[in-house]
Amino acid sequence: MKEYDVFIIGSGMAGMTIANKCASKGLKVGITDELPYGGTCALRGCDPKKVIIGATEVRDFAKRLKGIGIDTIPIVNWKDIMDFKQSFVDEMPPKIEKGYKKNGIDTFHSSTKFLSENTLEVGNDRIKADKIVIASGAKPRVLEFEGGHYAKSSTDFLNLERLPKSLLFIGGGYIAFEFAHIAARCGAEVTIVHRGENPLENFEQDIVKHLVSATKELGIKLILNTDVTAIEKVDSQYRVKGKSAEKTEYFEAEAVFNSAGRPPAIFDLDLDKAKIAFTKNGITVDKYLQSTSNPYIYSAGDAADSEGLPLTPVAVLEGHTVASNIIKGNSKEISYPPMPTVVFTLPTMASVGYTERKAKEMNYNISINCTEVGNWFNAKRLNVKEYAFKTIIDKETQTILGAHLIGPHTEETINLFAMAIKTKMRVNDIRTMIFSYPTLASDIPHML
């Protein structure tokens, strides 16, 4: 039996933050991950995805300026961009492990199961710890219908040696849209099949409709109100069965991808043996991110059923909170600043703060500005069709409650809105600021 002050399940950003912070205070720390160290974001998610998007951004910009300054639209070399992406991915796990060893953290590379409230089976080792942190992240939802195993994961997409000629994505969330946009710009025929009436359901639908238009303009088929009920392999293709209220349809594609959501990766840990309460959204935690049913346990990141969005910076924030509470005793309550989130399609769609519905539920007296601004200078100079915003303002305090944008580089502009919401800047103070011009940020005062 090996004993630790702190043992962490998962080496993503939450787990890494907790391990290094606890070790720096002299605690004996161990960490395990059955996958390469680094977590989803660095190895199988946001970082590699953003590298690949870089190539499609160049193609998109050239296409928009064709005939008004650009003669030739470049073609994305899939192999080259994947090799470039891999150069970032390959360097991460050894770099992280080297850092752990330097900090005296014991590293394991095995799956884990609970044996009791504070003991684990990690590969062939038995481990006992004063505190155990579940920071195991999330993983693709299991498709339980016939042929569901034929669907590949988002990780598979990011590791494609060759881009298929046709792809179908199951689900209408941000993964489906982002990867569909990448594939379509690289010349593939793309279909998205979503069971709901509206895709990207957690975003402001007044803005989502513009992304839907841009997606269709790109040639992507968007099928709504349709449940995928089976996948069948037919020669070198896959035949996907979709069922709606009115009819049954069949779609064919060379590859099918499961983008139907990512539940927390906690259900194989034998949580019941440790009396750990959980929901379908993760480990049930209190304001200190400690388990509500087992005081030995903390949880952070996508594995925790917390109020934090499933975003890397949020996982880091929760990691710092957990580490502080382990080191000092429960003295630090989790507090979330405004959490900007982005759909990295082209155009990008970004959101921070409350939606209109949420603000009304909370009984704010609000004013709303919701406008398409394709006639603004920034839209014209970049020759973009989709540029729109929806801002929600508290009439009483004259501060911003929410901002929802679609257009060029909204992934950057949204951070300024997040700053304004966090600092409670008054609308008039923003309107009277001088922004560098002509920049996309200089549009902000006109959005209020």
Image (cartoon, rainbow, N blue to C red):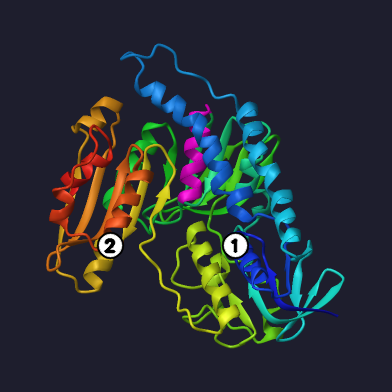
Q: Quadrant of the N terminus?
A: bottom right
Front residue of 233/254: it is: 254
Mark 2, residue position: 423
Is residue 425 highlighted in magenta? Answer: no
Is residue 182 highlighted in magenta? Answer: yes
Mark 2 is surrounded, within 10 Å at the Cα level, by few (under 14), some (14 to 19) or many (20 or more) other residues, namely few
Judge from the rendering whether residue 65 lies leftward or rightward of residue 28; answer left or right: left
Residue 237 x %, y %: 65, 36
Residue 112 visible from this viewpoint: yes
The three-letter code of the residue at mark 2 reads Thr
Of marks 1 and 2, which one's residue comes earlier in the chain?
Answer: 1
Distance between the alpha carbons at the discs numbered 1 and 2: 32 Å
Mark 1, residue position: 138
Front residue of 226/399: it is: 399
- Element at label 1: loop
Judge from the rendering whether residue 338 lies leftward or rightward of residue 105; answer left or right: left
Residue 242 to residue 310: above or below: above
Q: Range of the magenta residues?
A: 174-187
Outermost top residue: 71
Residue at the image position 59 percent from the left and 59 percent from the top: 13
Residue 113 x %, y %: 75, 75
Residue at the image position 28 percent from the left and 67 percent from the top: 358
